[in-house]
Image: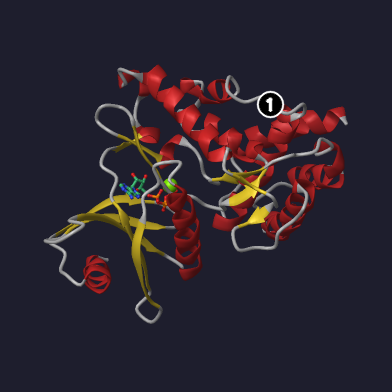
């Protein structure tokens, strides 16, 4: 891996890496802090397992970073070598620590930081455009039109995942039931196509030593859509302890069916994520699906 980072540094910055340190590892790749003798001196290089994820992050992160409404690291460049299996993106290094892995009891300005985060999410969602859809993807005039297509796509991955025995039959049937009653969940019109980060939880927020937001990283599935699609993530990781959702809704009015829609969004997104990474159903996923079941029974 170190060789790959050395090569990527050389190709992207035309200089050598002085020091390389692994700073993160996730499903999609590994992230390294690289220092070099010339500008920009310190960079983060993310090595992806697959080219498609690297391409996608490059597009999505560049888009959000270029708007300058949230502190998203800019992409300096890429180095892809299919034969050698190198799919590297170099980006601004964000100095600080990962909020999601921080014990919030140790924060001295927890409330103010939580307010900053809620404001940041509101600001992101205030970026809007006329049509709904993924960046560079087919555009739709209604949210329902786009999201229904998206559910059809997710179902193509969820069904075989269940058939492999990784999701119980009754849970698949619950998702199918919600799919059939899609129009009831989404009866209310979504007026604005808002910018969506796609993985907006505290594990993708870096905070500085003085406890301000230093960076918002790792977008995935950036789209213009219903701003409520990603709000369940404010209650993931340690977001609940910071009352992030409540703070967000002190600034923005929820839709009439927010709770019901949110149960749908989180169940479909999480099941789809599990199916993509081949993770068997567990208590976390079940907890989401129970919330969907609660609303499905009321229909
Ligand atoms: N630009 C950056 N500056 C500083 N640290 C970073 C940067 N990018 C990533 N990191 C660190 O590396 C970790 C993993 O990064 P990232 O979330 O992009 O990877 P991932 O493979 O998508 O992980 P996951 O699957 O957990 O989302 C982050 O939690 C963060 O601590
Ligand atoms: Mg991440």
- The percent coordinates of residue 61 (x first, y second) are 45, 54
Q: Residue at x 46, y 22 (%)?
A: 242
As drawn, is 84 to the left or to the right of 291?
left
Examine the rendering and report whether any part of residue 60 can be seen: yes
Is the distance from the Cβ of mark 1 to the nearest ligand 2 atom less than 8 Å? no
Regarding mark 1 in the picture, which secondary structure is present there? loop
Disc 1 target residue:
254
- The percent coordinates of residue 135 (x first, y second) are 59, 58
**153 relative to 95, above or below:** below
- The percent coordinates of residue 33 (x first, y second) are 24, 53
Badge 1 density bin: few <14, some 14–19, many ≥20, Cα 10 Å? few
Q: Residue at x 46, y 70 (%)?
A: 51
As drawn, is 111 to the left or to the right of 118?
left
Q: Nearer the viewer, residue 158 or 220?
A: 220
Q: Residue at x 49, y 29 (%)?
A: 119
**83 relative to 122, above or below:** below
Rendered image quadrant of residue 265: top right
Q: Residue at x 29, y 45 (%)?
A: 94
Placement of the C terminus among the 4 image quadrants = top right
Examine the rendering and report whether any part of residue 169 can be seen: no
As drawn, is 298 to the left or to the right of 152?
right
Q: How many marks?
A: 1
Q: Nearer the viewer, residue 136 or 45?
A: 136
Q: Residue furthest bottom?
A: 83
Placement of the N terminus among the 4 image quadrants = bottom left
As drawn, is 57 to the left or to the right of 159?
left
């Amino acid at each position: 891996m170190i060789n790959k980072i050395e090569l990527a540094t050389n190709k992207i910055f035309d200089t050598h890496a002085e020091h390389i340190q692994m700073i993160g590892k996730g499903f999609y790749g590994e992230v390294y802090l690289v220092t070099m003798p010339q500008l920009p001196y310190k960079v983060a290089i993310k090595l992806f397992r697959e080219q498609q994820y690297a391409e996608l992050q490059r597009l999505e992160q560049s888009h959000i970073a270029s708007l300058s409404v949230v502190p998203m690291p800019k992409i300096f460049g890429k180095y892809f070598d299919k034969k050698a299996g190198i799919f590297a993106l170099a980006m601004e290094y964000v100095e600080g620590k990962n909020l999601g892995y921080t014990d919030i009891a140790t924060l001295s300005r927890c409330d103010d930081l939580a307010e900053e985060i809620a404001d940041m999410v509101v600001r992101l969602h205030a970026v809007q455009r006329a049509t709904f859809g993924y960046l560079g993807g087919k555009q739709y005039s209604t949210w329902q039109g786009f999201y229904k297509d998206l559910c059809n796509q997710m179902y193509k991955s969820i069904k075989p995942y269940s058939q492999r025995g990784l999701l119980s039959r009754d849970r698949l049937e619950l998702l199918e039931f919600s799919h059939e009653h899609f129009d009831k969940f989404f009866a209310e019109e979504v007026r604005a196509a808002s910018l969506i980060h796609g993985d907006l939880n505290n594990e993708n927020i870096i905070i500085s030593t003085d406890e301000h937001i230093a960076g918002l990283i790792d977008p995935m599935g950036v789209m213009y859509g219903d701003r409520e699609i990603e709000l369940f993530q404010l209650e993931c990781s340690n977001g609940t302890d910071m009352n992030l959702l409540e703070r967000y809704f002190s600034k923005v009015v929820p839709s009439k069916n927010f709770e019901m829609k949110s149960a749908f969004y989180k169940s479909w997104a999480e099941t789809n994520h599990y199916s993509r990474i081949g993770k068997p159903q567990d208590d976390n996923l079940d907890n989401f699906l129970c919330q969907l079941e609660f609303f499905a029974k009321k229909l």
